[in-house]
Amino acid sequence: MIAAVKGPLRARGVDWVQVDVGGITLHISVPTSLVHELGEVGQEVRLHTRMLIKDEEPRLYGFPSSQALQFFQMLTGVSGIGPRTALNLLSSRTPGALTSAIMSGDLDAFSGIPGIGKKSAARIVLELKGKLEREPVGIPITSEGDDGDTIAALTALGYTTREARLALSTIDAGPTLDVEERVRLALGQIGRAE
């Protein structure tokens, strides 16, 4: 199993990159939103990866963080959701936005994503809501309750620091709220803004 890839970026397309690793160039499928965030050709990149076999052909999928990879694995575990559809989801929405939509049961958040209809969206919500409640994807929950920990939790979900700060500035998060509650409220705000 190839858990991660690190090396110079050699080429890129709409939804793939090629990375040199020890004299071998690997072709890696990635979310379209990630392609141009990786930097220029020739720069070193690091991707968390997952290899899947489809039609007897191995395919490597790459993600910028272990949380995004974990979310990809959760999505491909949903009945009827294959790697291509999971990539479409992660190309269209951040893991944080998808988590927010799943937790709130917002099926409209999945509209316009290739390969996802109402039935698929309902299946994703049904199969992943309980799992996300038991195993939050990369949310470090602490009892300190300050904005720094909340911002760290939101950025671990894939939001930018700016998005996290903006969401926090719009909620009434008094000092008595813990980080978990602040994250929940911030995700609600981000979900409404998207």
Image (spheres, rainbow, N blue to C red):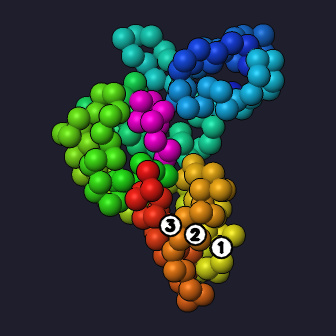
Identified at 46% across, 23% down, the residue is 52
Which residue type does callout 2 highlight?
Leu
Q: Which residue is mark 2?
A: 168
Real-space CA distance between mark 2 and mark 3, rounded to the nearest whole angstrom = 6 Å
Q: Which residue is mark 3?
A: 186
Q: Earlier in the sequence, mark 3 or mark 1?
A: 1
The reply to whether the magenta stretch includes residue 90 is yes
Q: Earlier in the sequence, mark 2 or mark 1?
A: 1
Foreground residue among 88 and 170: 170
Real-space CA distance between mark 2 and mark 1, rounded to the nearest whole angstrom = 8 Å
Looking at the picture, how far across and down is residue 17, in whole percent? 63, 18
Q: Secondary structure at mark 2?
A: helix
Quarter location, residue 167: bottom right
Quarter location, residue 62: top right
Which image quarter is the N terminus in? Answer: top right
Q: Secondary structure at mark 3?
A: helix
Badge 1 crowding class, 10 Å Cα cut-off, few under 14, some 14 to 19, many 20 or more, is: some
Side of 112 where 153 appears, left or right: right
Real-space CA distance between mark 3 and mark 1, rounded to the nearest whole angstrom = 11 Å
The extreme right residue here reads 43
Kindly report the secondary structure that dominates the magenta region of the rendered protein.
helix
Can residue 68 be seen here?
yes
Identified at 54% across, 42% down, the residue is 68
Range of residues picked out in magenta: 87-95
Q: Secondary structure at mark 1?
A: helix
Which residue type does callout 1 highlight?
Asp
Looking at the picture, how far across and down is residue 66, in whole percent? 60, 44
Side of 66 where 84 appears, left or right: left
Foreground residue among 150 and 108: 108
Q: Which residue is mark 1?
A: 147
Foreground residue among 102 and 60: 102
